[in-house]
Image: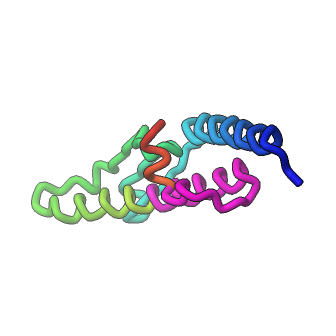
Amino acid sequence: MFGFGDIMGKVQELQQNMKEMKEQLAKEIIESSSGGGMVTIKMNGKFEVVELKIDKNAVDVEDLEMLEDLVKAAVNSAVTKAAEVAKEKMAQATGGLNVPGIGNISDMLGNM
C-alpha cells in the first residue's frame, strides 16, 4: 500500500521526467520534405520551424499556389512527425502511464 510520501515522491519523479522530456524535445530535430525535396522543413520537438529550404526550381512566379502547397505539405508532415516523437518521449517520461490532463501533446508543449 502506498503512503502519501510515496505518492508525492512519484509525482516529483514524474515532474522531473516531464522537465527532462521537454528539454530533450527542444533539442530533437525533425526533417520533412515535399515535392521530391523541393521544399524541406526542419522543426524541433517544440514544433518550431528551425530551417526552411526551398529549391530555386520550385519558385515559379506563375505558379505560387504550387509552392504554397509544397510548403504546407512539408510543414504538416513535420508537425505530424514531431507529434509522434513527442508522444514517444511522453510515454518514456510517464513510464507508459496515461496521466489525465497530459493527453494533448501540443497543449503540453505550449507551456514550454
> For the point 76% across and 54% down, which residue is it?
95
Q: Nearer the viewer, residue 36 or 75?
A: 75
As drawn, 35 above or below 3: below
Quick check: 13 left or right of 44? right
Q: Which residues are magenta?
A: 78-104
Q: Quadrant of the N terminus?
A: bottom right
Q: Residue at x 52, y 54 (%)?
A: 82
The verdict on residue 85 being magenta is yes
Q: Which x, y percent locates residue 103?
A: 54, 60
Q: Quadrant of residue 26?
A: top right
Q: How many callouts does the rendering have? A: 0
Using the image as rendered, state which of residue 10 and residue 26 is in the foreground: 10
Residue 98 in the image: above or below residue 52: below
Residue 31 image point, x, y percent: 51, 51
Q: Residue at x 57, y 60 (%)?
A: 84
The secondary structure making up most of the magenta span is: helix
User: Is 82 situated left or right of 13 in this image?
Assistant: left
Depth check: give the residue in front, 73 or 54.
Answer: 73
Does residue 8 appear left or right of residue 49 in this picture?
right
Residue 74 spot, x, y in % from top left: 39, 59
Return the x and y of residue 112 as percentages of the image width and height.
Answer: 48, 36
Q: Quadrant of residue 77?
A: bottom left
Seen at 43% across and 38% down, the residue is 50
